[in-house]
Amino acid sequence: MASNNEVPKTCKVIMADTIAKGLLAEVKDTLNKIQGDVDRRPKLAAFLANDDPAALKYAEWSQKTCQENDFDFELRQVDKEELEEKITEANQDDCVDGMIVYYPIFPGNPTHDKYIQETVSLQKDVEGLCHKHLYNMYHNVRFLDPPHNLKKSILPCTPLAVVKILEYLQIYNPILAYGNRLYGKTITVINRSEVNGRPLAALLANDGATVYSVDITGVQLFTRGQGIKQPRHQVRDKEGWGLEQCLPHSDVIIGGVPSENYKVPTELIREGAVCINFSSFRNFDGPAIKEKASIYVPSVGKVTIAVLLRNLVVCFLLVPPFSPDIYFN
């Protein structure tokens, strides 16, 4: 209990659905603008070739959100041996505008999963996992067709969802030039997976932040150089560093460790930090973090699905006769 001389701490807990509503309204508004040019709704084909309960739950959430927002969703449960063939068929199907594949398909064989990612057509890759989209993301190239810049490159759903959350929380500074709006912010991302953690660190550094990327092998520093002078992020190892060196200096801490036993050490977090959890498990101690953080976002799942639909509309817009002036920011 606070003494008479202390100001009680207040932590604002922001739920994912609150943020997702604004993104879905933007998606629906854009969809309404293009409905007069076509006689069908964008269609998402979702491929499930594993028995992961979390993947099935994600598919169910995606289906529900699609149906609520005038998208067609088709879950295609297939054997892993025929997945490549089914994806190839969908690539050639003009009625399919976007595809999502629930990974891992081949546990213990990430090379085979990567091969499946490359099987999805660039024009239908709503997850942003094809090489061209990943190359653009890491090299801070925002469009598929420079210098015309009419076709946006797709960004991976969960990393982009975290970016959209940071924009909602006004961590991005709109006064600064686009691409520099995280300048002056220090962010720790606890996860360096190739699907989520590393892309997220790259996106944040490309927007001007100083990013500490932490995993079990140690800490890497992602920046655009002194004074954000480089066109894309640079990476260097921080020898001997751990959370003890990163967290006390971080304005934002993002947890993405896929373990129910892992908790970010609350005592290392600076007073008033913003804490975001994108793991399917809670990486922060709920009661304790509310005593330390100024803002806490306990999950991002619904924002990720909203971004998935946003990416689907962008794929839909890659096909003529659509005009670039209705693209998202």
Image (cartoon, grey):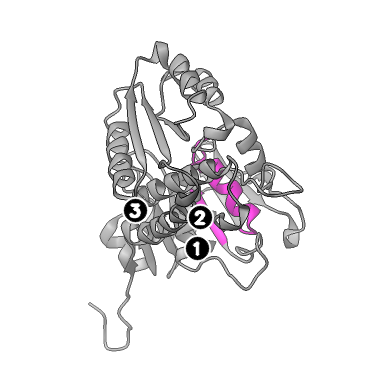
Quadrant of the rendering where the N terminus is positioned? bottom left
Depth check: 3 or 206 in front? 206
Residue at 48% from the left image edge and 61% from the top image edge:
166
Q: Nearer the viewer, residue 299 or 248?
A: 299
The local secondary structure at tag 1 comes to helix
**Number of the label disc, if any, that sits on residue 296:** none
Instruction: Confirm or deny contact between disc 1 and disc 2 (CB under 8 A).
Output: yes
Image spot of residue 240 (x, y percent): 59, 45
Where 315 sits versus 181, above or below? above
Residue matched to label 3: 284
Secondary structure at badge 3 equals loop
From mark 1 to mark 2, how far is it between C-alphas? 6 Å
Residues rendered magenta in the picture = 186-209
On the question of residue 156 being in view, the answer is: yes
Nearer the observer, 5 or 325: 325
Q: Quadrant of the C terminus?
A: bottom right
Name which of mark 3 and mark 2 comes first in the sequence: 2
Instruction: Give the residue at x 68% y 49%.
Output: 233
Q: What residue type is disc 2 on?
A: Val
Mark 1 burial class by Cα count in 10 Å: few <14, some 14-19, many 20+: some
Q: Is residue 54 left or right of residue 254?
A: left
